[in-house]
Amino acid sequence: MAGLLVLWDIDYTLVEADGVGRRLYEMAFAELYGRPLAIAPTEVSMAGRTDRAISMDVLRLAGVPDPRGEVGRFEAALTRLAPAVADLVAATGRALPGAAAALTAIAALAGRAGPRQSVLTGNVRALAAAKLAPLGLAPLLNLDVGAYGDEHEVRAELVHLARRRSAAAYGRRFDGEGTVLVGDTPLDVHAAKATGARAVAVATGHFTAGQLAAAGADAVLADLTDTGQVLSAVLGR
Ligand SMILES: [Mg+2]
């Protein structure tokens, strides 16, 4: 039996937590290498990329030999230290307008065959939880079936992982357009298109509605504030 799996991106789609990821990278780097992470924020592109990909860039730019060999250790440090940034999220982050209402409205449709919701994010899982929980969004998502940025460098590969986990958890398949990705960057859209999923784009990050449409999004929203519009875009009707 087919179902509908809605996979939400986190940064600039559900939440704005500026500086939190960077703070965590600084903490992990200092702990592992005993020196401050001295690279400018503008040197590494983060939007829509996975922590695996970002970590390798950061390690290379910081002069760490063998970034690929070191990345597992660095990700483990990110995971270990992530709970420590939850306070920073609570103090400086925010859920984007309409995010909680959209998650709640989709959750309300979840009968036996209704949509299931999780995340597909470049964040390592512990950082995802540290961003969602303080802002009240974690209870609306099944984080166990999501896919995370330390599981593969390439975002599209995370779609396969989330589908497999969801199929095992819910006893139904989420092939093709049975999966919907909601995200704010062309990389979110590309991950959906590469795996036959539908792409709903939200222009609340660093990309315009025009850029997201050009990337191939099936639906583009200015933001999540109109819950009815979000439901139509996600359900494809
Ligand atoms: Mg994002």
Image: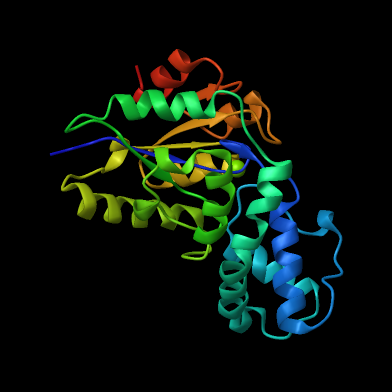
Whether residue 122 appears in this view of the structure is: no
Ligand 1 is found in the corner quadrant, namely top right
Q: Specify the quadrant of the image occupied by residue 31.
A: bottom right
Foreground residue among 28 and 171? 28
Q: Quadrant of the C terminus?
A: top left
**Residue 128 visible within the image:** yes
Residue drawn where x is 61% and y is 62% of the image: 82
Render colour scheme: rainbow
Q: Is residue 162 left or right of residue 174?
A: right
Q: Is residue 117 left or right of residue 26?
A: left
The image quadrant that residue 2 belongs to is: top left
Image location of residue 32, percent across then percent down: 71, 81
Question: Picture coordinates of residue 233 (x, y %)?
Answer: 43, 21
Q: Is residue 87 above or below residue 151?
A: above
Q: Is residue 97 above or below residue 4?
A: above
Q: Residue at x 80, y 83 (%)?
A: 34
Q: Is residue 61 left or right of residue 10?
A: right
Q: Residue at x 56, y 18 (%)?
A: 225
Q: Is residue 29 above or below residue 194?
A: below
Q: Position of residue 7 (x, y in %)?
A: 41, 41
Q: Residue at x 58, y 66 (%)?
A: 52
Residue that protrudes farthest toward the left in the picture? 1
Question: What percent of the width, then of the height, locates residue 99?
Answer: 53, 29
Give the number of marks: 0
Seen in the picture, residue 28 relative to 132 is either above or below; the reply is below
**Residue closer to the observer: 234 or 215:** 234
Q: Which quadrant would the N terminus be assigned to in this image?
A: top left
